[in-house]
Image: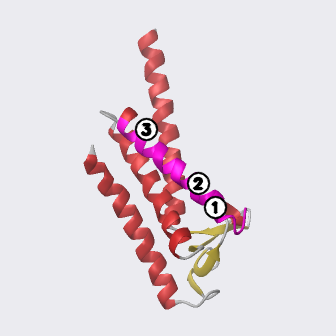
């Protein structure tokens, strides 16, 4: 089971490395167009949660993140045995949670840099980072795993 922790470490390392690159090579507000107008790298900081909610409430983030990390580790050891996809999704979730937690503890803010404009609806999506991506992907994976398990359990009952 512990080999999965390496996946969480990879997510944290990739997240922290990309944030370090942004902080060291870009000024706050600098923008690099990658695919005009849909994708850019934008040096941005967030002192709150998703979409800038709860700005400056570090104590809330610390408590919630510690509880979430504890819950992830608990569920990983209790529920993920012989469920590799569930284990992977929990470790990606752990890596994402730790990535942003490290920023909040050591920087007092989260470094965001991925700026996406969604075509057709012309929506400028809130700026995010690798940890945020990991959190989103892992939650989708967990939902899919749980739906699959539910379907399999219904087949067993029949």
Q: Are marks 1 and 2 in contact (CB under 8 Å)?
A: yes
Q: Residues within 10 Å of mark 2 (few under 14, many from 20)?
A: few
Residue placed under numbered mark 2 in the picture: 63
Frontmost residue, 27 versus 109:
109
Residue placed under numbered mark 3 in the picture: 75
Marks 3 and 1, how far apart in space? 24 Å
Task: Indicate the position of residue 75 as horizontal and vertical percent values.
Answer: 43, 38
Disc number lying in front (2 or 3)? 2
Frontmost residue, 99 versus 104:
104
**Helix, strand or loop for disc 3:** helix
**Helix, strand or loop for disc 2:** helix
Q: Left of 19 or right of it: where is 113?
A: right
Disc number lying in front (3 or 1)? 1
Residue placed under numbered mark 1 in the picture: 59
Task: Indicate the position of residue 125 as horizontal and vertical percent values.
Answer: 67, 66
Q: Is residue 72 above or below residue 9?
A: above
Q: Quadrant of residue 145?
A: top left
Marks 1 and 2, how far apart in space? 6 Å
Q: Is residue 104 above or below residue 83?
A: below
Q: Are marks 3 and 1 in contact (CB under 8 Å)?
A: no
In primary-sequence order, the first of circles 3 and 1 is 1
Frontmost residue, 15 versus 56:
56
Task: Indicate the position of residue 15 as horizontal and vertical percent values.
Answer: 44, 69
Q: Quadrant of residue 77?
A: top left
Q: Is residue 54 above or below residue 18?
A: above
Q: Is residue 90 magenta?
A: no
Residue 128 got which mark? none
Q: Which residues are magenta?
A: 54-77
Q: Quadrant of residue 109?
A: bottom right
In primary-sequence order, the first of circles 2 and 3 is 2
């Amino acid at each position: 089971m512990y080999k999965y922790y390496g996946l969480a470490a990879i997510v944290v390392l990739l997240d922290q490395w990309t944030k370090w690159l942004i902080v060291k090579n870009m000024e706050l507000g600098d923008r690099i167009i990658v695919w005009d107008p849909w994708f850019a790298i934008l040096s941005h900081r967030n002192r709150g949660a998703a979409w800038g909610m709860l700005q400056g409430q570090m104590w809330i983030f610390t408590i919630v993140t510690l509880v979430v990390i504890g819950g992830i580790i608990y569920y990983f050891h209790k529920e993920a045995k012989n469920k590799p996809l569930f284990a992977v999704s929990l470790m990606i979730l752990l890596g994402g949670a730790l990535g942003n937690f490290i920023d909040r503890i050591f920087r007092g803010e989260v470094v965001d840099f991925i700026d996406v404009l969604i075509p057709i609806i012309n929506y400028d999506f809130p700026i995010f980072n690798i940890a945020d991506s990991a959190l989103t992907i892992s939650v989708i994976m967990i939902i899919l795993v749980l739906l699959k398990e539910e379907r399999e359990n219904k087949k067993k009952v029949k």
